[in-house]
Image (cartoon, grey):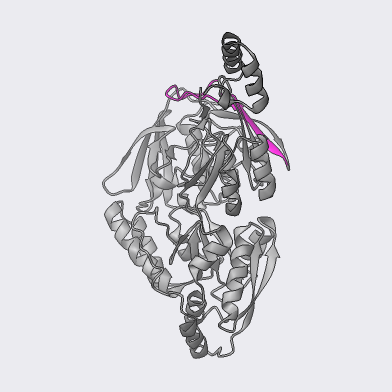
Amino acid sequence: MITSLFPAPFTRLAQRLSLSAALSVVIMASVAMPAQAGKAVLNLGMSVEPTGLDPTIAAPVAIGQVTWQNVFEGLVSIDESGKVRPQLAKSWDVSPDGLTYTFKLQTGVKFHDGETFNSTTAKFALERARGKDSVNPQKRFFASIASIDTPDPETLVLHLSQSTGSLLYWLGWPASVMVGPKSAASDKTHPVGTGPFKFVNWAKGDKVELAKNEAYWNSQVSVKLDKVTFRFIADPQAQAAALKAGDVDAIPEFAAPELMSSFKDDPRLVTKIGNTELKVVAGMNNSRKPFDDKRVRQALMMAIDRQTVIDGAWSGLGTAIGSHYTPNDPGYQDMTGVLPYNPEKAKALLAEAGYPNGFTFTIKSPQMAYAPRSAQVMQAMFAEIGVTMNIEPTEFPAKWVQDVMKDRAYEMTIVAHAEPMDIDIYSRDPYYFNYKNPVFNDLVKKVQETTDPALQIKINEEAQKILAEDVPALYLFVMPKLGVWDKNLKGLWENEPIPSNVLTNVAWKE
């Protein structure tokens, strides 16, 4: 029983020893090689290197995956279940008309450089996010804030111009974290926050290093890790090799579903399949022909067998969707039956729209694995209804953001939208879909006019129906969270209501 735990040479040695000597060897081995006792260092792998480290000035989710809840914190936070929790604001009160939010702030909080956090610094962070010169990727979150009062260091009062039902939730996002007046300008390359970890170093192209904040304000949290290194490994094969070699301890978002089974016989590793908000959609430029015709968009949607896309792009690991909503979201409606796979009906719709012989167009496909794989499956399906789709590889994020988000110089693209509860993107003007529907826009407005969750759910159900029928984008699937990490690690999020690598409660088992 005992010797079977060890490799053959060790077994033969034990067999040659007396019973007492063998037991001594076993005892010494257990002392010399504890599971992970005393270990406080973590090497964590990521597929995409962030373009900067300040989530309040740029949109790529990789920024928040390094710094949100680790370096930077917000007035409130979002937990693994997607619920809003107090953070730098310990409590709040909302006036009956929904126009005044009064926050009571934590005391004794300092930024990593020693600067004090109080209502004045909170006001600075919010004014910076909502100001005329703001480059905050979610500037719209703060648009309804008309003025901010700081009656004392512990009290922050937001006066709104209109009711904003999602405000508290939005204040928990990476784009809403608190930054200090002295350090804000350099946060992109040297982030300074109030969080449990301090920034140490960024070796571009390789890694970002963080260290435990020994002066962390939250006495209710016991941070176990002394040092964390984020390693950037783009190639899935290299990710798998790094995990198996022990060069990284965890990859919370493993990039190759087809390799997940390769870890099943490794006793050191565990695999986790969780939920995300990553909605893979093929967005169309609704202002360009032929995509300005709803019949064409509907035909393309009906030409796609979503499960075949999931099988081909993500090894069958994913959930088909028919609108811009995930099964995790409150009020989710399964809309995949609105325009189900039906190539013959798709052909009839194309003919009705004036394209009996189909047409040719180009899809801009970013280099993330799911995109070209999905595009290739779609390409074959479109060919069956006489439509030719050319695939143009597009570097992400820089080239894709410029061509699609900024210049709208595209016909179709494919990307995973990571923002939770972001159905409102179809009402944004400008936004890359160039989709305009006054009825839909009115629904989005009504969601913010109420703080009643039940009413918000009912309104969002109607919004889902409109998108499912109008198809401003081809709704494909929700990607799962594929995690692989050392079995002795605990505290990593298995689900992902917001893109993140929250390390506050991560520790090695003793």
Q: Residue 170 location, x and y as percent?
A: 44, 47
By secondary structure, the bulk of the magenta-drawn segment is best described as loop
Position of 415 relative to 22 (above/below): below
The one of 486 and 201 positioned closer to us in this rendering: 486
In the picture, measured across the screen, residue 217 lies left or right of residue 454, that is: right
| Residue 48 in view of the camera | yes
| Residue 475 in view of the camera | no
The one of 65 and 451 positioned closer to us in this rendering: 65
In the picture, measured across the screen, residue 242 lies left or right of residue 450, that is: right
Position of 416 relative to 224 (above/below): below
Q: Which quadrant of the figure has residue 433?
A: bottom right
In this picture, which residue range is highlighted in magenta?
Answer: 206-228
Residue appearing at x 46%, y 51% in the figure:
141
211 magenta-colored? yes
Residue appearing at x 29%, y 44% in the figure:
95
Q: Which quadrant of the figure has residue 284?
A: bottom right
Position of 91 relative to 107 (above/below): below
Residue appearing at x 59%, y 86% in the figure:
358
Q: Residue 369 location, x and y as percent?
A: 63, 57
Q: Residue 450 location, x and y as percent?
A: 31, 55
